[in-house]
Structure formats: structure tokens, C-alpha cells
Image: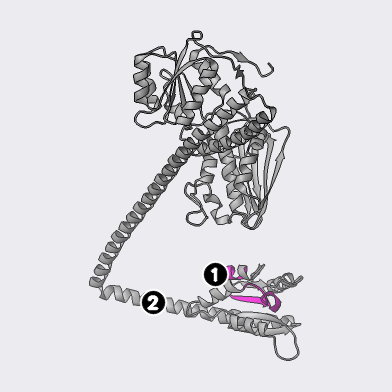
Amino acid sequence: MSVEDRILILALRGRDAVVLDQLIARQGHDAAVCTDARMLAHELGDGAGAALITEESLIGADRAPLESWLAAQEPWSDFPFILLATKRAGQRPAEAMRVLQVLGNVVVLERPVHGETLASAINASLRVRRRQYEARSRLLALQSAEERLTNLNATLEARIVERTHELSRANNQLLQEVSERERVQAALVQSQKMEAVGQLTGGIAHDFNNLLTVITGNLDLIRRVAANERVDRYAGFASHAAERASKLTHQLLAFSRTQQLTLTSVAINDLVDNMTDLLDRTIGPQIERRRVLDPQAPFVVADAHQLELAVLNLAINARDAMPDGGILTIATSMSSSAPEGLAPGRYGVISVTDTGTGIPTEIMSKVFDPFFTTKPVGKGTGLGLSQVFGISRQSGGTVQIDSNEGQGTTVRIWLPIASTEIHETEVVAARPLLADGASARALVIDDDDAVRRFIVEALELFGYDVGEAASGHDGLAMLRAAPPDLLIVDFAMAGMNGLEVAAAARALSPTLPIVLATGYADTDETADPAVVNTTLRKPFKIDDLSRAVRVALNAPEVVGPDA
């Protein structure tokens, strides 16, 4: 039997649908049971001969899809409905009358209905529908005959139409090319914008690192020379605050850097712990923050800075998904079952969960696409999740996302477990750093007066006779006049940058130990180890300076963590 002859049933109360289905089957007709009005509209689109509906199934239901289908019927169609209504005394309710108006061609049978009466109504509805199909066939036949006649009598017109179609296709192709060019141009503009933002962010972080170098360095000097316990305590408080500020600048630098990932062994519990201050300031007080750290969480293979950036991106997305507040949960765990796409093995997992708006199902497949964002213009770049995906894939892991619209989202970063753990970094003992006795001489080149003054004071504390210059040209002139035993040069300077100064100094004095001080994140990628002995990251303390000088002099004095 054709699908156009079947009877659709919408009866949502009790066993009504089952009973009606059995009755229709006994009459020799095919039936399909619908679970709601939306499914009824969908099945009508596939074809049917009549629909049998109980009145209460439509009252209060979402009838919009059904009304849309009825309004869009072809001129030959007036679909028949049989409505099983509740027997009432007096006038029907307004909602029931609206249902009748919506259905149009409807036969109303008040319950209880005798089986023969219902069977007769069904057969009558099917006869009406078949006559409509016959009218359709005649109409189509007339249309086909008219088209053939038109084609026979309008050869010239057909050629004109064909030519018009060719022009239309050419025009459509041109419009597509223009649209594609605009899309590529927009992507280029967005990429340039992100590059500019990265450069701006790196520049701001560099300048801020200079300030922090002066603050932390001089606080370190104060604590070394202060004889007053209260002064030492106050300086310690300030040093702690400066270290927290330094951590924020490291996050800015991680955003702006472009180098390849430096994969090391990272303790994910420690990483989440160390991000507490940053997340507190970024997320704000309206979001409740929770941490669920698995004590068995492993060391994983990752770039620590980039992994922090990934977690930060996910936390910001979670915050934006909870404009009226909610709960943000960051958890760690270990799993022995690898998700699809990863090799079998054990993995460490960092999950970020929010109780926000969730992600619609229809866009779930696009959330990791670069530049895709659901945020308003100016509120998001569309790069956050794509960066998270790229970082996890480069680290040998993957990302999974689960979301229920209106209930929240969970994003999990899967990372392979590291074969060895990170041990506490060895530190260099702080002691006078004389290369050739008390007469050793150092030269400091930095265009920031405060940073340069701190480095000079620290080196003098080590026992060096220190010369200083505010530019690369002045420093090279001093180096030619009196070659030093050690050169410390800043990277970002006007005129000649630190790498150019170091290369010129290396040409003048091939064995000169050179330390490059920098507040940027990616200088290691550009610094030639044949020119620069070591890089000193800003902000730094006296012990950091001591360590860098020893590396440059190739005379390390190292003590273990238990010393």
C-alpha cells in the first residue's frame, strides 16, 4: 500500500493510540502513530491519506509546524482530518474551536464512538483524499501538456531563456568568487588583527617586566642589606605581590609568543594550583570556583605555559557562558581508556565544567573551527577553542566537549602521561661572581635607567667593577675602549637591539661571556647560542642574575634541592 494511503494517528492519552492502530489494521489500512504535533507535521510531509486525532492531543500543544504545513498545501489539496472530541454539554471551549479552524477539512466524532462509525468516517476521508490525488494527476497532466505545447511553439524563447540561464550562472559564479574573496579578506584582516594584538600584548608585557625587574630586584637588595626585621618583612610582602604580578605578565607573553611548543613533563595538579590567582582575577567574584584534583593525577607531556593558556581560555569561555553567575569546576584525573583518535594507553585529563547556557547541537561540530564564535562582535575572536585544540593535538592528546543546551558544558583536555617526572630545579648558590679576582669588570647596556641601575648595583654587590651604557652604540664604544670580562645587554632597545649588540661584541671579543636580558617570550627562538651564552628572563631577582652570570662564565656552582 502506498504511503499516501496510510492513516496517521495522534492520540497521546493512555492506550488510545494502540486501540486505534488495531482498529485501523482490522479495516485493512496502514497506520503510523505520531508522538506529538511536530511529528504529525513531519509525517504529513512524507504523505498520508487521512489523520485520526484525539482532541486533547492538540489543545495546548505546539501546533506551529502543523499550521505551516496546512498553509503550504498545494491548490489541489485539502487534507482530511477525523477529530475524536470529548463529549460536552453546551458550547465548545475557545481553544477547541481554534483547533477546528486550524484543521479546516475536519470530521468531528464525539466519544464514545462506535467502531463502525469510526470505520465509515475513515473510509469517507480516504475517498476524499483519493479524489484529491486524481485532481492532482489531472492537473499535472494539464501542466505537462502545456509545457510540451510551449516548448514546441517557443523555440526562440527557449534559446533566450537558455542564454539567460548561462548569464545567470556566470553572474552567480562571479558573486561566489566575490563572496569568497570577501571571506578570505575578512580572515586576513582578522589574522592581522590578532597579530597586532599579540605584538601589543608582548610589548606591554615587556614594559611591565622592566618595571617588575626594578621592583623585585631592589626589594631583593633591600632584604639583603636591611638590618631591621620589620623592613625585611615588609619587603617580603611586596616581593610576594611582585611575583604574582610577574605570573600575570607570563600569561600575557604566552598569548603573544609564536614559537613551537616546548614539551616537558608537567604536573597537572600543580599547574591548576598555580593558576588560582590568575583565575580569581579573570573570572571575577560572581562565579563560584571549585577544584576537584585527583591525588593520583599524573605528570603529562605538555608545554606548561601553553597548557595554562588553554585552561585560561576554557575558564574565560565558561565565565562568558554564565552571565548571571554559576559554578566553574576545574578537575584533574587519570584515565586508562583512550578516547577515539588516540592510541591506547594512560592519559591525564584536565576538565573545565560550567553550569552556563550550553552549546546548541547544530553548531557543536564547528566550535573548534578557527574564527568561529557565537559571541557578539567585539566580544570574542573565535580562536580560544581552536588554540585549545591545537595545543592538545601538538602535545599528543585531544579535546572532547560535552554540552547540554541550558544546562552547561564540559571540555576535557586529554594528554599523554610523561615517562619521567620533573624534579625540583637545581639552584645556583649566591656568592660573589668574580671572573678574574676582585679586578673583574662588567659592562651593562640597557636603555631603561631603573633596570640598568639595579643590575649595576647587584653586580657591584658581587664585587664587579661595573660600567654602564644607555644604548648599543655607546656600549660598543666603551667595549672597544676597555674590553670587559662580562657583558649584560637588554634585548629591546632603540637603534640597535640586544642581539645586534651581542653579535657586534662577539666579533670584537670572541670569548666574551654575554648575557641577554629580555622581557619577551620568544627571544630564545631568535638568539644564536654561538653569540649569546644565556638568556635572562625579566623580571628577575639577584639569584636569577647570579645564575645567568655563572652560566655565561661557564663556571656553575650548583647545589641540589636538599642542600
**Left or right: residue 24 compared with residue 480:** right
Task: Say whether residue 241 is visible.
Answer: yes
**Closer-to-camera residue (122/173):** 173
Q: CA distance from mark 1 to mark 2?
A: 23 Å
Q: Which residue is labeled 2 in the image?
A: 143
Q: Which residue is labeled 1 in the image?
A: 45
Task: Say whether residue 396 is visible.
Answer: no
Q: Secondary structure at mark 2?
A: helix
- Point out the tag, 1 or 2, that comes first from the N-terminus: 1
Q: Which image quarter is the N terminus in?
A: bottom right
**Is residue 265 placed above or below 284 in the rendered structure?**
above
Q: Does the magenta run of residues contain 60? A: yes
Crowding at mark 2 (Cα within 10 Å: few <14, some 14-19, many 20+)? few
**Closer-to-camera residue (103/77):** 103
State which region is magenta. Answer: 39-62
Q: Secondary structure at mark 1?
A: helix
Residue at the outermost left position: 156
Q: Position of residue 335 (x, y in %)?
A: 68, 35
